[in-house]
Image: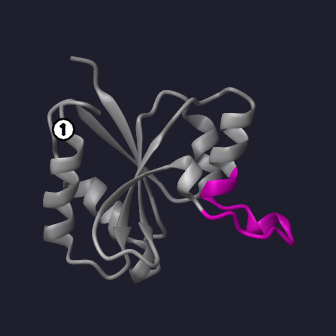
Amino acid sequence: MKTKKVLCFGNPFIPIDSLAIEIGKELKLKGFEFVICVSPQEIIQHTNFSFILDVCENIKKVSLIGIKDLKANTLFTLHDFDLNFFLQLMKSIGRIDEVKIIAIPINYDKQKAKEEIAKILQRKNL
C-alpha cells in the first residue's frame, strides 16, 4: 500500500487558523503521512501529495472539495498570495493534477473533526 501525503496548512500562532495543524500532529492513520505546512509557498516543495487539510470559512461540517471549488482572492501585493493561488499555479504548470482538499469549519470541535477526517480519508474510492 502506497502512503498518501496530506499537507496540513495553518498558522500555529492564530487559534482560528491552527486546527488543521493540530489535527495533523495528532491524527495517525495507516497509509497516510501528515505533513505540517505553515506557509502557502511550502506547497511548491511538494509534488507527490493527495490531500490538503485546512480550515475554511462559511462551511458547517468537514467537507471534501476540489481546487475548482476554491474562491479566488484579489491580489494587491505579494503578501496576498494564498493557498488557492499556489494550487492554481502548480496545476497550470503541470506540477500537480487534481488535489482533494479537506476543509474544516473555523472553530470546529477538534475530536469531531478528527473522526470526520478519518472517515473521509479511509473511503475506498479516494
- Expressed as whole percent of the image width and height from the top left, the position of residue 66 reads 48, 48
Is 87 on the left-hand or right-hand side of 21? Answer: right
Looking at the rendering, in which quadrant would you find the N terminus? top left
Looking at the image, which residue is at 16% across and 45% down? 28
- Number of callouts: 1
- In the image, 95 versus 123, the foreground residue is 123
- In the image, 96 versus 59, the foreground residue is 59
Mark 1 sits on what residue? 123
Is residue 117 in the magenta section?
Answer: no
- Expressed as whole percent of the image width and height from the top left, the position of residue 114 reads 18, 60
Q: Which residues are magenta?
A: 71-85
- Expressed as whole percent of the image width and height from the top left, the position of residue 93 reads 75, 30
Against 80, residue 106 (above or below) is below
- Expressed as whole percent of the image width and height from the top left, the position of residue 123 reads 18, 38
Q: Quadrant of residue 30?
A: top left
Looking at the image, which residue is at 73% across and 35% down? 92
